[in-house]
Image (spheres, helix red, strand yellow):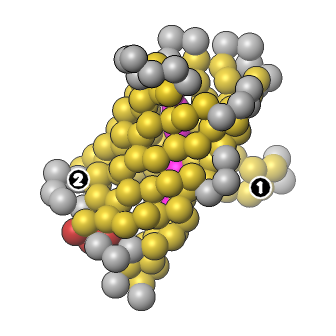
Amino acid sequence: MKQVIYAMQFKGNAAPKAGATGVIKAATSASSCTLNSVVSAAGIGGTLTTAQGGKAAFESEVILTGETSFTETGTIRFGDSNHSLRFITVGQGFLGKSPDEDLQHGAVMWKVDGGEGQFAGASGLITSNFTLNASGEVTDNHFGLIWVR
């Protein structure tokens, strides 16, 4: 099996699911990008730069399980073709206050639960570190290590 790694920043919205209590629907997208991390005498710094290529689309359903906990299932589609993967939460995610009073901050780990195209028979893990503001705007930073055939 071959390893595929990716780092992308997804942006979009999250809102309560109509007719359901404690359920949130999220929809975000990300452009192809380059992530640079540089260690120097000043410490660590990083930049995310848009790169040529297609976009990825993310959709999920979040179920709130406690004051700061949740589970999530969803899909990520890479490009305009049929390269997509499905994921489920490993354990529970966390969403709480951040040092910025205008944002909540959270993190979650997902297990790849199947896919299509490049991701048929795939397995792996994706980490998500995200922020959410009061109007539902989401910025979600993914790092994935996916095993493909």
Residue 32 appears in view = no
Question: Which residue is nearer to you in this view: 7 or 33?
Answer: 7
Q: Position of residue 129 (x, y in %)?
A: 62, 43
Residue at position x 58%, y 47% from top? 128
Q: Which of marks 1 and 2 is nearer the N terminus?
A: 1
Question: Which residue is nearer to you in this view: 44 or 134?
Answer: 134
* Position of 116 relative to 53 (above/below): below
Dot 2 falls on a residue whose secondary structure is loop
Residue at position x 42%, y 40% from top? 60
List the single residue furthest toward the left.
81
Judge whether residue 113 is colored magenta. no
Dot 1 falls on a residue whose secondary structure is strand
Q: How far apart are marks 1 and 2 (CA)?
A: 35 Å
Q: In the shown orientation, is residue 43 left or right of residue 146?
A: right
List the single residue furthest toward the bottom.
1
For the record, the magenta segment spans 138-144
Residue contact between numbered discs 1 and 2, judged by CB atoms under 8 Å: no
For the N terminus, the quadrant is bottom left
Mark 2 residue type: Gly
Residue at position x 52%, y 20% from top? 21
Residue picked out by circle 1: 40
Residue picked out by circle 2: 79
The overriding secondary structure of the stretch rendered in magenta is strand
Q: In the shown orientation, is residue 75 left or right of residue 98?
A: left
Question: Which residue is nearer to you in this view: 45 or 77?
Answer: 77
For the C terminus, the quadrant is bottom left
Q: Residue 18 carries which label?
A: none
Judge whether residue 142 is colored magenta. yes
* Position of 20 relative to 113 (above/below): above
Crowding at dot 1, Cα within 10 Å, few <14 / some 14-19 / many 20+, comes out as: few
Q: Position of residue 3 (x, y in %)?
A: 46, 79
